[in-house]
Image (cartoon, rainbow, N blue to C red):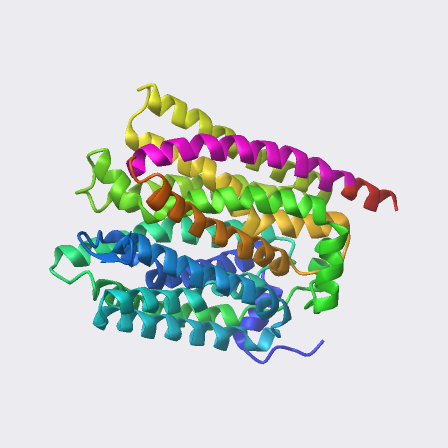
Amino acid sequence: MTEPANRVTRWLARASPGLFATYAVTMAFTTYFAMYSFRKPFAAAHYSDQTFWILDLKSALIISQLIGYALSKMLGVKFNSEMPPGRRAWALVLLIVWAEVALVLFAVLPPGGKVAAIFLNGLPLGTVWGVVFSFLEGRQTSEILGAGLSCAYVVASGAVKAAGAWLLGLGISEAWMPALTGLAFLPVFLAAVYGLSLIPPPSAADVAARTEREPMSATERRDFLRQFLPGLLLLVIVYLFQTGYRDFRDNYAAEIWAEVGLGQQASVFALTELPIALSVMVVLGLLYLVKNNKRGLMLTYVIMASGAIIIGVGTMLFDGGAIGPKLWMILVGLGLYLGYVPYGCVLFDRTIAALGIVATAVFLIYVSDAVAYGGSVFIVLYKTLGQANISKLQFFRQFSYATSVVCLLGLVVSGQYFLHRARKAVVA
């Protein structure tokens, strides 16, 4: 193997697992955290009394960005699965510059133009996760790396909305606030991408422990889907509910907090997400200690199913008056992310390893995402047009119960399916 030219890359190739994981998590977390400053700040504003067609403007903006994001996920099935490692860093830079230009257009265009601009903003951002995770997958420390990266979107969404609310408090207009928030984080993003590009490829020991991760051709992707379609279909349905639930909680957080009387506290967007991120990172990071891939996959399903239960129980306690709104939002957020985060890192990485096949987790992540974000668009339309007579808080409570039940059932059945396949692979 050729010696890496960069001194940092050479050091990382020889570093202990702890030092390597610390560096890789820091760079991946920072990259994705900064990406959120280009995606979510607009959700901190209300855009009151503004409409687009038959929708209020904020709902139209959310739907438009989600459509762009969902289309990005569909394109990402091919884009991310086939991308050579040497192009990843430049791809990240080009994607984020595109997103910032769209936010500048958002600032200067009228309401109809804003809806188009936010679509263009979502279009590149959906591929960023896959590019970043491609630097991390297929390693012995993938659970730790993936959990650390996933904490970025748990914390970042609240943090950038808090930053956006702070800018609004300074007198920045709702139109310019998203572009200025993104611009403030751009140097951080560029520095983190450079650091990410210095990470060496998986070692021989990584390949031996987690199987080889190679780009997948169109034929290989179709064959994989046909072979494991029933289990994948159940996982996609679960993910559809989780993604719709997450996006509703995320995009309408300002309205939900306002309904429970805490809408004036900008810090509430971020402070409730910190304990969630830390808890999820610790729980998923501990899976690193489980070296047996089949056992690791089983425990991943246990964690995800526990999350579904927490959502339902937490909402029951809130409805019964046993807990207040802050603890309720923390509990449903914890339950949500215990089930949601593994899709982006641990679940498919362990599935590939347990089945003993050569594939890429990024492909499976983007297949799930491509369907799930389309479901998020449906949820917003259903609430806006079909359930307009109830508040967003009331809708979110009902959605919590539905998500809890559907996800628990889907995870139990899909878990049995893939664990059975994993046992057959071991026997073979």
Residue shown at 69% from the left, 63% from the top: 213
Q: Residue at x 50, y 42 (%)?
A: 241
Q: Which part of the image, by quadrant, shows the N terminus? A: bottom right
Which residue occupies the foreground of this view, 215 or 173?
173
Q: Quadrant of residue 106?
A: bottom left
Can residue 249 be seen in this snapshot? no
**400 in the magenta segment:** yes
**Residue at the image point whose x is 74% and y is 64% from the top:** 220
Task: Work out whether 223 lies above or below 117.
Answer: above
Q: Position of residue 384 (x, y in %)?
A: 33, 45
- The x, y position of residue 278, in whole percent, is 42, 42
- Is residue 44 a member of the stretch shown in magenta? no
Residue 8 as seen in the image, left or right of residue 101: right
Q: Position of residue 365 (x, y in %)?
A: 58, 55
Q: Position of residue 264 (x, y in %)?
A: 17, 43
* Quarter of the figure with residue 363: bottom right
Q: Please tell me which residue lies in front, 66 or 2.
A: 66
At x 74% / y 67%, what residue is drawn? 219
Figure label count: 0
User: What are the residue bounds of the magenta stretch?
Assistant: 391-420
